[in-house]
Image (spheres, helix red, strand yellow):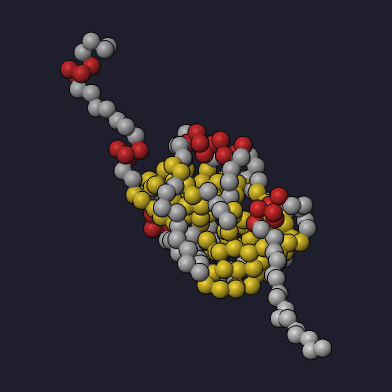
Amino acid sequence: TPTTELPTTIVTTYDSILDVKQGTLGDTYTTRGIVVANTGKGLLITEDDAYIFVYLGAASSYVKGDYVEVTGTTSTYGDAVQMNSDSVVTKLSTETYSDPSTYTELTANDVTNLTSGFNVGEYIQITGVVSVSGSYINFIIDGSSVVGSLNNPDIDFNAINGETLKVTGYILYLSGSSTRYLNIFVTDTETTSASQVFDLTILTINDLHGHI
């Protein structure tokens, strides 16, 4: 009796980003995602609305839209689960990725409250003043004990040092102990005048009559 050999179907399985984040720390995982940001020392990747930071500890050539597979162990840094520097990253394809069309605008109080919990990859906008200190790009947020720490190798932050800006970008992690730093990968900056930051009312002498 003749036999027919059926084609072999190869099923590739990997851990979802959500499963990695909820899994046992220190275990080895293989996950996949689209590169959202390359910070110069790591990658923010996403799939199915979940995000994770892959710490590489060095520069890499991956760009936004690269679909990659990452195999490595996990740990926590900056109050968030991340893939460690032992991770092996393999580009699988090139996809199209666009930053979200909407963001969450955070007040100073909202930023302070992030010390109680935050979502990696959340797309936010905050207002503050750029303060460059060596290689550190701080972002002073009036009214918050948390200091922003800005990242994007393609932006010349020295050129906007001291300016008041609205910054839009992705939350990466929180770092620091006595002072907490909210690390943000910046996708857009918008110059903001002081009048937009502070709602000032100028009173004349006649305006003050009856109030003093």
Q: Position of residue 176 (x, y in %)?
A: 63, 45
Q: At x 69% / y 54%, what residue is drawn?
A: 19
Q: Nearer the viewer, residue 11 or 121?
A: 11
Q: Is residue 198 above or below residue 130?
A: above
Q: Is residue 179 visible?
A: no
Q: Is residue 82 above or below residue 32?
A: above
Q: Position of residue 188 (x, y in %)?
A: 41, 55
Position of the N terminus, as image quadrant, is bottom right
Q: Is residue 69 visible?
A: yes
User: Which residue is outermost to the bottom?
Assistant: 2
Please indicate whether residue 120 sits to the left or right of residue 166 in the image: right
Q: Position of residue 22 (x, y in %)?
A: 71, 50
Position of the C terminus, as image quadrant, is top left
Q: Nearer the viewer, residue 38 or 179?
A: 38
Q: At x 53% / y 54%, what residue is drawn?
A: 136
Q: Position of residue 100 (x, y in %)?
A: 45, 54
